[in-house]
Image (tube, rainbow, N blue to C red):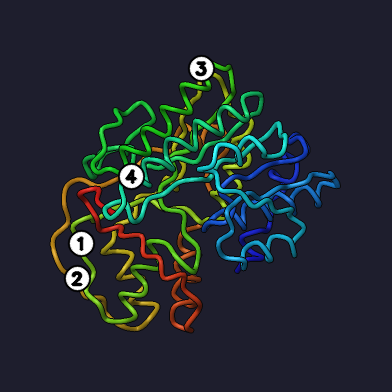
Amino acid sequence: MEELLCRPRPTLVDFMRTVSSPLVVLGAGGKMGPTLAVLAKRAAQMAGYPLEVIAVSRFSDETPRRWLEAHGVSTWRADLLERGAVQGLPEAAHVVYLVGLKFGTRQNPGLTWAINTLVPAYVAERYARARLVVLSTGNVYPLVPVGRAGASESHGLTPLGEYANAAVARERIFGHFAQRLGTPMAFLRLSYAVELRYGVLVDIARKVWGGEPIELANGCFNCIWQGDANEMILRALALATSPAEAWNLTSPQVLRVREVAEQLGTLFGRAPRFIGRESNTALLSDVSKLSAVLGEPATSLAAVLRWTAHWVQHGGRSLDKPTHFEVRDGYF
């Protein structure tokens, strides 16, 4: 599975020739960072281009650090809440920013706001002359009516909950520095990257397989295969501008929780159980703007559903990090 996530398409191989060495990936120890860094390294190798990729994280878990280094990615240990540590980061003309905190906000909101506001200010100061892609979230939007186009990038940012508001603040702080310092940036508002060890499809599949009831209140969602999301994040380096511009990142297809569960139930040979009723609003994003520039995700969601069912049915490893996709009040 990791090999599949890190398999670059020709479009990315060609693009990586335009990226200056080193490429610095901040927050590379999380769920997406390791495969994104290795994807970038492998694409550069396939292009015959000597690109150094530096993955920066606290690396509180040594496993991703060892995996990155085994795949040719350099690692740099740093606590980005320490301003001095940020100032000591290596020089780079291209930076991918994956730092953020969502879960645990209810228990420790101060830490969520610190990571989503202080770290952006430190990084924007350090890399004032670089080109940045900043990973944001579709949670910056409010719930929108089901059956219409999802929220576009011009939609007002009036979300629910402290995490989502801290994510808005992250964008605003980066945007301030982009305008004041002339730093080109692109904000990618990601909605539900999925792979086989975590994500909304895994959450639903595990419930179907385990015979647990599935809450229908948040009845619709978008999601995107993590390999496609990582590719688009890297290619979005070409979209960085000053002032900064936002781009929604997910699949254009709107999925219904009930239909996904029923498809998984067919693959498992068991009927899903449901509770609650579908609401007439959901967290949905319109990705037509990004699709017009970078194209649509290459991996079909039908394929991802088959892979997910096989993985769960055969006891594939889980990160045990549920997405809480059913949450509607913004509290995580």
| Residue depicted at 58% across the width and 17% down the height | 182
Give SS at disc 1. loop
Give SS at disc 3. helix
Give SS at disc 2. strand
Q: Position of residue 220 (x, y in %)?
A: 28, 53
* Res 58 → quadrant: bottom right
Task: Pick whichever of labels 4 and 1 is earlier in the sequence.
Answer: 4
* Badge 1 amino acid: Leu
Task: Pick whichever of labels 4 and 2 is earlier in the sequence.
Answer: 4
| Front disc: 3 or 4 | 4
Q: Position of residue 139 (x, y in %)?
A: 33, 43
Give SS at disc 4. helix
* Badge 2 amino acid: Phe
Pointer 2 with pointer 1, Cβ within 8 A: yes
Task: Pick whichever of labels 3 and 4 is earlier in the sequence.
Answer: 4
* Residue 274 badge: 2
| Front disc: 1 or 3 | 3
Q: Position of residue 312 (x, y in %)?
A: 44, 78
Give the crowd class for mark 3: few <14, some 14-19, many >=20 residues within 10 Å. some
Give the crowd class for mark 2: few <14, some 14-19, many >=20 residues within 10 Å. some
Image vertical order of residue 155 relative to residue 102, above or below: above
Viewer-closest of 292 and 223: 223
Quadrant for the C terminus in the image: bottom left
Give the crowd class for mark 4: few <14, some 14-19, many >=20 residues within 10 Å. few
Look at mark 1 in the image and give the residue it sits on. 216
Look at mark 4 in the image and give the residue it sits on. 110
Give the crowd class for mark 1: few <14, some 14-19, many >=20 residues within 10 Å. some
In this rendering, position of residue 267 left or right of residue 73:
left
Look at mark 3 in the image and give the residue it sits on. 179
Pointer 3 with pointer 2, Cβ within 8 A: no
* Badge 4 amino acid: Gly
| Residue depicted at 45% across the width and 35% down the height | 118
